[in-house]
Image (spheres, rainbow, N blue to C red):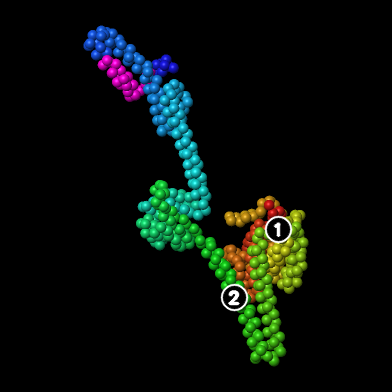
C-alpha cells in the first residue's frame, strides 16, 4: 500500500503543505541531533545521515494520510460542484480517512435524499398550482408579478411575469386593494370589479398577504374568478321567473276582468256571456299549456342524471306525431311528408322525451310555415354528431332528423335566440300566433340530455330547417 502511495507522490498538490508538515515534524529530531553533535556524542556526518533517515521516515509515515486527505478534499469539492464522483473508486488504507469518507458519504446520501424529496414535492406543488382553473398571481413588494399559473397566462398573456400588476389592470379599486396589501394596511382584500379591456368581464378578486415565514420574493397572492357567467345565469333565472309571472298574470287578468263583467254589466247578456266564456277557455288552455311546459322544463332539469334505456323507434314516433298534427296541418293547407334516406335503426333514449321533441319541432314548423306548402321530415344515419366547444355529445353513429318548412327567413340575431326560454320573435307576436316560447327550449334540453345536438338554419329560398342529431347508443 505504501508503495502504491509512493508511486502517486507526484500527485500531491503543491499547496497541500506536505513538505512543510514533514519539516515541522522532523524539526525536534534535527535539534536533538544538532545538540548531540555539539556535545561530541555524534559526528556531524552521522547526525546528518540520521536526520535524513528521520525525514524519509516522516515522509513515508505522513504521505498516505496526506494523499488520502487530498483525495477526500477533491471528492468534497466535486460534490459541491454536483459532479458525478464516487468515493468508492479511491483506495483508502488509513482508518481515520476511511471513517471520514464513510461519514461524508452518509451525509451526502442524507442530503441527496432530502433534496430529491424536496424537488419531487416542489414539482408536485407546481403541477397542482398550474392545473388550478382560475388565474393566480404572485406579486412582490413592488407590485411586480413573480409567478403565475397557466390559467393566468391564458387569461392575461404569456409574458406577464416580471410585469407590474398595475400595467395589466386599469381598474382603480383593484389597484387600490393591491396597494393596501403591499403597504401592510390589510392582510386580505375581497372585491368585485369590471375589466373593460376584457369585454367588461366581472371579476371577483381575492388578495392575500403571504405569512412572514414564506420564502422567495413574493409577498402576496392574487386569485381571480370570472363571475360573468354565474351572474348571467342568475339573471337568466331572474328573467325566467319574471317572464313566467308575466305570462301567467296576463291571462289571469283577462279572466278576472271577464268574470267581473259577467257578474255586473253583462250578467244577463247571453251573447256576451258566450263570447267571454270562449275567450276565458282560450286563456285557460294557454295557462294550462304554459304550466305544462314549465313542469316539463322542471322535470328535464331533475332528470339530467337519469339513465336512458328505452329502445326508441324514430319512424314510429314520427308517424304518431304526423297523425296527431294532421288536422292542424290540414287547416293550413300543409302537407307533412316523412322521408327516410336509409334504414333507421332504433336508438337508446327516453321514448316520451323524444316524442315531445318531434311534437314541438313539427308543431312549430306547421305554425310558422306559409300556407299551401310542404313540411319535410328527413331522417338518415350519419357517422357522428357534429359538435362545438362546450357541448358534450355522444360518440359513434347517430340519426339525423331534419325538419324543414317553407316559412319566412329568420335573421341571424333571432336564430341565435330561438331556443331561449320565453323568447318569441316580434313578428310572430304581431301576427298573434299563439305560443308559450318554451317549446324549442324544451326540445333543446331533451336533445342535450340525450347527448345529441340541435342546430337551425334559415334561408329566403329554402325556409327554416331544424336539424336534430340523436346518438344510436349512449356510449
Horizontally, is 350 left or right of 190 in the view? right
Q: Which range is magenta?
A: 9-32
Q: Which of 429 and 23 is in front in this view?
A: 23
Residue 388 visible in this rendered orientation of the protein: yes
Q: Residues within 10 Å of mark 2 (few under 14, many from 20)?
A: few
Q: Does the magenta stretch include residue 20?
A: yes
Viewer-nearest of discs 1 and 2: 1
Q: Which mark is residue 246?
A: 2
Helix, strand or loop status at disc 2:
helix
Q: Quadrant of residue 390?
A: bottom right
Q: Residue 397 carries which label?
A: none
Helix, strand or loop status at disc 1:
loop
Q: In this view, does 252 lie above or below 107?
A: below
Q: Where in the figure is residue 24, as x and y percent of width and height?
A: 29, 20
Q: Where in the figure is residue 316, as x and y percent of width and height?
A: 77, 61
The residue indicated by pointer 1 is 308
Q: Where in the figure is residue 396, as x and y percent of width and height?
A: 68, 51
Horizontally, is 47 left or right of 137 in the view? left
Amino acid at each position: 500500500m505504501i508503495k502504491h502511495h509512493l508511486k502517486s507522490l507526484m500527485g500531491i498538490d503543491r499547496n497541500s503543505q506536505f513538505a512543510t508538515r514533514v519539516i515541522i515534524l522532523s524539526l525536534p529530531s534535527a535539534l536533538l541531533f544538532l545538540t548531540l553533535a555539539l556535545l561530541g556524542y555524534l559526528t556531524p556526518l552521522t547526525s546528518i545521515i540520521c536526520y535524513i533517515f528521520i525525514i524519509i521516515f516522516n515522509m513515508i509515515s505522513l504521505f498516505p494520510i496526506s494523499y488520502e486527505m487530498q483525495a477526500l478534499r477533491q471528492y468534497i469539492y466535486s460534490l459541491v460542484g454536483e459532479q458525478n464522483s464516487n468515493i468508492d473508486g479511491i483506495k483508502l488504507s488509513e482508518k481515520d480517512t476511511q471513517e471520514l469518507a464513510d461519514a461524508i458519504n452518509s451525509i451526502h446520501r442524507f442530503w441527496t435524499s432530502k433534496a430529491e424529496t424536496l424537488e419531487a414535492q416542489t414539482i408536485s406543488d407546481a403541477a397542482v398550482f398550474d392545473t388550478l382553473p382560475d388565474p393566480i398571481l404572485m406579486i412582490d413588494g413592488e407590485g411586480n408579478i413573480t409567478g403565475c399559473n397557466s390559467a393566468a397566462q391564458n387569461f392575461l398573456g404569456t409574458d406577464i411575469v416580471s410585469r407590474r400588476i398595475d400595467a395589466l389592470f386599469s381598474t382603480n379599486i383593484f389597484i387600490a386593494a393591491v396597494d393596501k396589501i403591499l403597504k401592510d394596511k390589510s392582510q386580505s382584500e375581497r372585491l368585485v370589479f369590471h375589466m373593460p379591456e376584457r369585454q367588461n368581464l366581472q371579476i371577483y378578486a381575492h388578495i392575500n398577504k403571504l405569512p412572514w415565514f414564506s420564502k422567495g420574493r413574493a409577498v402576496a397572492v392574487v386569485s381571480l374568478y370570472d363571475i360573468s357567467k354565474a351572474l348571467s345565469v342568475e339573471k337568466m333565472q331572474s328573467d325566467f321567473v319574471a317572464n313566467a309571472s308575466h305570462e301567467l298574470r296576463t291571462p289571469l287578468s283577462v279572466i278576472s276582468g271577464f268574470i267581473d263583467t259577467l257578474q255586473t254589466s253583462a250578467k244577463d247578456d247571453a251573447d256576451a256571456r258566450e263570447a267571454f266564456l270562449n275567450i276565458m277557455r282560450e286563456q285557460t288552455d294557454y295557462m294550462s299549456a304554459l304550466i305544462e311546459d314549465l313542469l316539463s322544463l322542471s322535470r328535464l332539469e331533475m332528470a339530467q342524471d337519469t339513465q336512458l334505456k328505452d329502445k326508441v323507434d324514430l319512424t314510429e314516433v314520427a308517424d304518431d306525431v304526423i297523425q296527431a298534427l294532421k288536422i292542424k296541418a290540414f287547416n293550413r293547407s300543409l302537407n307533412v311528408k316523412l322521408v327516410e334516406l336509409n334504414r333507421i335503426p332504433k336508438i337508446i333514449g327516453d321514448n316520451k322525451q323524444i316524442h315531445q321533441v318531434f311534437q314541438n319541432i313539427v308543431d312549430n314548423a306547421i305554425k310558422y310555415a306559409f300556407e299551401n306548402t310542404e313540411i319535410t321530415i328527413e331522417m338518415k344515419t350519419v357517422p357522428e354528431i357534429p359538435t362545438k366547444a362546450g357541448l358534450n355529445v355522444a360518440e359513434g353513429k347517430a340519426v339525423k332528423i331534419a325538419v324543414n318548412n317553407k316559412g319566412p327567413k329568420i335573421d341571424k340575431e333571432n336564430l341565435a335566440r330561438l331556443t331561449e326560454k320565453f323568447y318569441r320573435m316580434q313578428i310572430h307576436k304581431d301576427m298573434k300566433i299563439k305560443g308559450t316560447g318554451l317549446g324549442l327550449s324544451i326540445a333543446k334540453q331533451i336533445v342535450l340530455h340525450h347527448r345529441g345536438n340541435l342546430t337551425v338554419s334559415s334561408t329566403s329560398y329554402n325556409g327554416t330547417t331544424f336539424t336534430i342529431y340523436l346518438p344510436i347508443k349512449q356510449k
